[in-house]
Image (tube, helix red, strand yellow):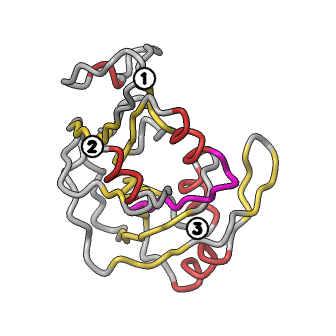
Amino acid sequence: MITRYFLIYKPFGMMSQFSREGDKPTLADLPFQFPKDIYPVGRLDADSEGLLLLTNDSFLNNRLLNPKFKHQRTYFVQVEGQISTEAIQQLQTGVTISIDGKQHTTLPAQAQVLVNEPLLPERNPPIRFRQTIPTSWVSLTLYEGKNRQVRRMTAAVGFPTLRLVRWAIEDVKVGLLQPAEVKEVQKEWLFKKLRIR
């Protein structure tokens, strides 16, 4: 079997799957003809955007989804309010969130305030601007991937997520990709960036 690897910038509002569910757009709506055996590695919620990897390589799928490998994913997160040093420290050390009714304490994460707003494509539709409520941007790097984890974490420290963009998986970055853009990459390049030997 020939293994193939694609990076996409998943747009806001799109499901991370090819099959239809309701009226939301899916990966099948991207302007690209993927081979039949390609599937997404992991997922981003419809209301999140950014880097998604698609492949037919089951080895890579296992390496990126099996929790024992603890690969890093970096998100740029716009939160409501001027985030505090205390909240950043809590995100770094781990916060307790509820997942499917069970309490889970997140692994230590890398978290820092982004002084300048990251250079990202415009979101469609844009975040609702409110003059009286400031927002902050945070870079958050996780080593686990629980359901809606970033949103649950920022809410737990008192700063709800407004916009969530997955910027990187290990050293593979969104870079200049635009929403709905697809880029095929070579295995050697990808495995090196993902630090897979």
| Residue 99 in the image: above or below residue 196 | above
Which of the two discs, 2 and 3, labels the residue nearer the N terminus?
3
Q: Is residue 114 above or below residue 140?
A: below
Label number found at residue 185: 2
Q: Position of residue 136 (x, y in %)?
A: 37, 71
Residue 24 position in % (x across, y down)? 38, 22
- Three-letter code for the amino acid on which mark 1 is drawn: Met
The answer to which quarter of the image holds residue 157 is bottom right
Which image quadrant for residue 12?
Answer: top left
CA distance separating discs 1 and 2: 17 Å
Q: Which residue is mark 3?
A: 158
Mark 1, Cα crowd under 10 Å, few <14 / some 14-19 / many 20+, is few
For image coordinates 64% across by 49% down, the residue present is 146
Q: Position of residue 134 (x, y in %)?
A: 35, 71
Q: Is residue 156 left or right of residue 179?
A: right
Image quadrant where one finds the N terminus: top left
- Was residue 75 drawn as part of the magenta stretch in this picture? yes
**Amino acid at the residue labelled 3:** Gly
- The secondary element bearing badge 3 is classed as loop
**As shown in the figure, which amino acid type bears the numbered disc 2?**
Val
Give the quarter of the image for residue 113.
Answer: bottom left
Instruction: Report the magenta residues as a range.
Output: 66-78
94 sits left or right of 26 in the view:
right
**Residue nearest the viewer, comparing 34 with 12:** 34
First in sequence, mark 1 or 2: give its number: 1
Q: CA distance from mark 1 to mark 3?
A: 48 Å
Q: Residue at x 29, y 21 (%)?
A: 34
Which residue appears at 25% of the width and 25% of the height? 30
N-term-proximal mark, 1 vs 3: 1
Which residue position holds label 1? Answer: 1
Give the CA distance from mark 2 to mark 3: 39 Å
Q: Position of residue 187 (x, y in %)?
A: 35, 44
